[in-house]
Image (spheres, rainbow, N blue to C red):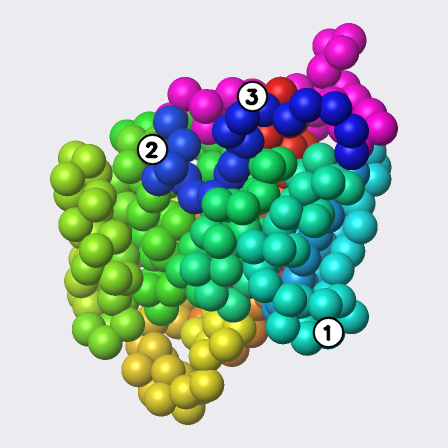
Amino acid sequence: MTGLKRAKPRHFLDLNRVDAGELRVMLETAGRMKRGAAHDGEAKPLAGKTLAMIFEKPSTRTRVSFEVAASQLGGHAVVLEPSGTQLGRGESVADTARVLSRYVDAIMIRTTKESILLEMAEHATVPVINGLTDVTHPCQLMADVMTFEERLGPIEGKAVAWSGDGNNMATSWIHAAVRFKFELRLACPELLRPPQSVLDWAAAEGGRIVVSSDVEAMVRDADAVVTDTWVSMGDDDGETRHNMLRSYQVDDRMMAMARPTAIFMHCLPAHRGDEVTASVIDGPQSVVWDEAENRLHAQKGILAWCLA
Ligand code: CP
Ligand code: NVA
């Protein structure tokens, strides 16, 4: 990496830290990339550039979609597993950020703690992208909004129901509901609600978010039903979670409460028989494979925006 870098890099840390208009720019770019309609000068924004990817947790979709996106945009990706780097031996996140910024043009990090992402962003002089933390997963939501709109048109004013753990995905859905102006109804057990600070932020922003343990009330007439694993990476109370979440499983009965045109969404990986039945995830209302594909297109929109 040579030459001058912008004084303030364009990080993609969370949907609540980026304006709605900018998020739309990324989705429009993603759509053009998917249709093969990117105009001259837009198709290869990573030409000669390198993306570093740090994974403190496992990944299939995020890792492969970013690596393929970097390559298709004319660039290159380097994957770093902490165990194989000095990060794993205690080199600080700040020093790692400073050093990587001298080699690469952007850093994507999937980390166990949000504080590590924020420290990386504070000390990097190149854009930092959140590839999932314990509290959010914004790249996934860009692919999810893209998928919803491909199937059902503009998401603004529509109703999305979440059934399950109020986890990192639930928080990013809340951020998305505010930014893209849709109604979000979360059915969660009392002990697994999204953080109150996130709900307070959404309320202050005028978001239409409801949280309840009444699954039927949340799912009724929804345009989309969404869930995620009951045990996220880093959770160590699997049995307790299964007991609390059993009645939140998305099954055919629950899908029948939503609108007849409703879609089923899941970021994957899925656990058939736990958070969703095979009949739903493998059934006609499921859009999970489009969601997975759209990770690739959405990453391109995000990378192009960060490096613009
Ligand atoms: N949905 C998602 O982020 O998948 P991976 O954990 O495989 O990256
Ligand atoms: N909530 C899940 C999402 C995986 C993509 C986790 O954090 O493990």
> For the residues marked 1 and 3, what is the alpha-carbon distance in whole angstroms?
37 Å
* Numbered disc 1: secondary structure: helix
* Numbered disc 3: secondary structure: helix
- Nearer to me, 112 or 232: 112
In this rendering, position of residue 285 left or right of residue 297: left
Q: Which residues are magenta?
A: 20-49
**Residue 266 in view here:** no
Q: Look at the numbered disc 2 and say if its residue's Cβ is closer than 8 Å to ligand 1.
A: no
Q: Earlier in the sequence, mark 2 or mark 1?
A: 1
Crowding around mark 3 (Cα neighbors within 10 Å: few <14, some 14 to 19, many 20+) is some
Q: Which mark is residue 28?
A: 3
**Residue 8, relative to residue 251: is it above or below?**
above
Residue at x-position 45% and y-position 23%: 22
Foreground mark, 1 or 3, reads: 1
Q: Which mark is residue 83?
A: 1
Q: Which mark is residue 219?
A: none
Indicate the position of residue 175 as horizontal and vertical percent values: 34, 43
Indicate the position of residue 144 as horizontal and vertical percent values: 50, 43
Q: Identify the amino acid type marked 2.
A: Arg
**Residue 128 in view here:** yes
Residue at x-position 20% and y-position 68%: 213
Indicate the position of residue 288 as horizontal and vertical percent values: 58, 52
Q: Identify the amino acid type marked 3.
A: Glu
> For the residues marked 2 and 3, what is the alpha-carbon distance in whole angstroms?
15 Å
Q: Is residue 39 magenta?
A: yes
Q: Identify the amino acid type marked 1.
A: Ser
Residue at x-position 68% and y-position 23%: 4
Q: Which mark is residue 179?
A: 2
Q: Earlier in the sequence, mark 1 or mark 3?
A: 3
* Numbered disc 2: secondary structure: helix
